[in-house]
Amino acid sequence: MRYKLSQQQKASISNNLIAFMDSREELSQEAAAFIGNWILTDASEKGKSYYDTWDMVLKSYMPFTRPVLYRSCNRREEGKIASFTESIHSAHKFSGNKGFLLICDTEETLSFPELQKCGDYRHTFFPISELLKKEAQLPSCKFSKSLIGNYAKEDEYIMRVNLGWMYSCKWYHERSNQNET
């Protein structure tokens, strides 16, 4: 079953995620359900409601940190909203030694003030793992201990693929020579 949200729900979730990360509000149950569903849903089941909501978040959220982010993918799809990680080891694990590695130095991409206009940010990302860790510290945590334990360490970030501002490499797997003795 597809996860469907009205335009008002998408805006409410987006605004709450940003306000929570900026320490202005508590995380709403609706936003927590959105994050939990995102984490636990297979990529093939993620529909328009997810991506519309992330689009609103990415246009209006400016993160505090500036990590280098990685993504393994079979195809480089410009403009796609996708999951990245701060761990090249995790990216390699998901690659199966094939496809591409996208690398984004967010310190570099977020250093141009002329590209950053609130409500129309182009190179931002959203740190899901940071949100989980922050919520886990609260006495009224809206996530289960198992979800926090399993996914906070994943270092997942949501970001739009912008190949003009990312490095792209092909995974290389050296094959051993079977005929050597």
Image (spheres, grey):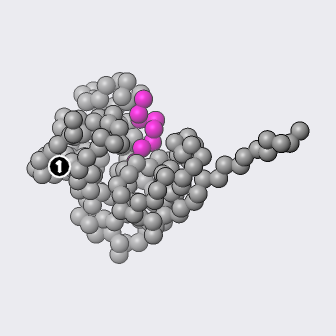
Q: Quadrant of residue 25?
A: top left
Pick whichever, 180 or 31, lies toward us. Answer: 180
Q: In this figure, what is the number of numbered marks?
A: 1
Side (left or right) of 113 relative to 74: left
Rendered view: 108 above or below 18? below
The answer, for residue 57, to whether it is visible in the render is no
Tell me which amino acid carries mark 1. Answer: Lys
Residue wearing tag 1: 10
Q: Over which residues does the magenta segment extend?
A: 150-157
The residue that appears at 47% across and 47% down in the rendered structure is 85
Rendered view: 147 above or below 79? above
Pick whichever, 105 or 141, lies toward us. Answer: 105
Residue 116 picture location, percent across and down: 33, 69
> In the rendered image, which quarter contains the C terminus?
top right
Q: Main secondary structure of the magenta part?
A: helix
Residue at the far front in the pictured view: 179
The residue that appears at 58% across and 57% down in the rendered structure is 170
Residue at the far right in the pictured view: 181
Residue 154 lies in the magenta-colored region: yes
Rendered view: 39 above or below 103? above
Q: Quadrant of residue 111?
A: bottom left
Residue at the far top in the pictured view: 145
The answer, for residue 112, to whether it is visible in the render is yes
Task: Say few, some or many: other residues with alpha carbon within 10 Å of mark 1 (under 14 / 14 to 19 / 20 or more).
Answer: many
Residue 168 picture location, percent across and down: 53, 61
Residue 152 lies in the magenta-colored region: yes
Residue 105 picture location, percent across and down: 50, 60
> In the rendered image, which quarter contains the N terminus?
top left
Pick whichever, 96 or 151, lies toward us. Answer: 96
The residue that appears at 26% across and 56% down in the rendered structure is 55
Q: Quadrant of residue 35?
A: top left
